[in-house]
Image (spheres, rainbow, N blue to C red):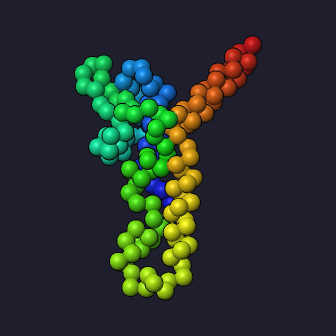
Amino acid sequence: MQLSTKSRYAARALVELALEYGQKPVKLKDVAARQEISLKYLEQVMFPLRISGYVKTHKGSKGGYVLAKPPQEINMYDIVKTVEGSLSPVDCVDNPDTCQRIDNCVTRKVWVGLKEAIYNELSKISLAELAERQRLIHQTMKKDQSTEKE
């Protein structure tokens, strides 16, 4: 199972918004430039996040995107599920009626466990945590750059 670029780009974009949470809206073109993502593709990635209520847009010259919820209330599972859809490895996990062998299938428990493991792992990580990690990386990079100049 492999997640698409939508998940990776959505997570990176929302970390950018989390870094600016409570401040001014962030222009999507700035996020696209900093994250080296096509603006057109990023617009498509952000659409389901807006529809699902994770981000809001503000119009006008000072407009842009903001998180609609505090970063600690949004986790990686929320993001990935919003842009990817179901994270079930097989259809019968979400839709038992799709399989005639549901009552005697020994592998279904494996697939259910895999979905639960994905949920448990992704739901542990909030946008606030990722933003803090990003801040630490930026601080380390600034220190390294200032040391190189000396």
Of 38 and 10, which appears nearest the observer?
Answer: 10
Q: Residue at x 73, y 18 (%)?
A: 147
Residue 103 or residue 86, whichever sits in front: 103
- For the C terminus, which image quadrant? top right
Is residue 21 placed above or below 115 in the rendered structure? above
Residue 97 lies in quadrant: bottom left
In the depicted structure, whether residue 94 falls above or below residue 29 = below
Picture layout, residue 43 above or below residue 60:
below
Left/right of residue 81 with respect to residue 56 in the rendered view? right
- Residue 134 in sight: no
Please indicate, yes or no, whether residue 140 appears anywhere in the rendered image.
yes
Q: Closer to the camera, 65 or 129?
A: 129
Q: Residue at x 57, y 52 (%)?
A: 121
Q: Residue furthest front?
A: 103
Q: Position of residue 44 (x, y in %)?
A: 32, 45
Q: Quadrant of residue 96?
A: bottom left
Decide: is 10 above or below 136. below
Q: Name the residue at the left extreme.
A: 60
Residue at (50% x, 35% y) in the render: 72
Q: Nearer the viewer, residue 62 or 33?
A: 62
Q: How many marks?
A: 0
- Report the side of 12 relative to 97 (left or right): right
For image coordinates 36% across by 24% down, the residue present is 25
Place of residue 136 in the rendered image (x, y in percent of width and height, measured from the top left): 63, 28
Q: Position of residue 8 (x, y in %)?
A: 48, 46
Residue 70 at x, y percent in the picture:
44, 32
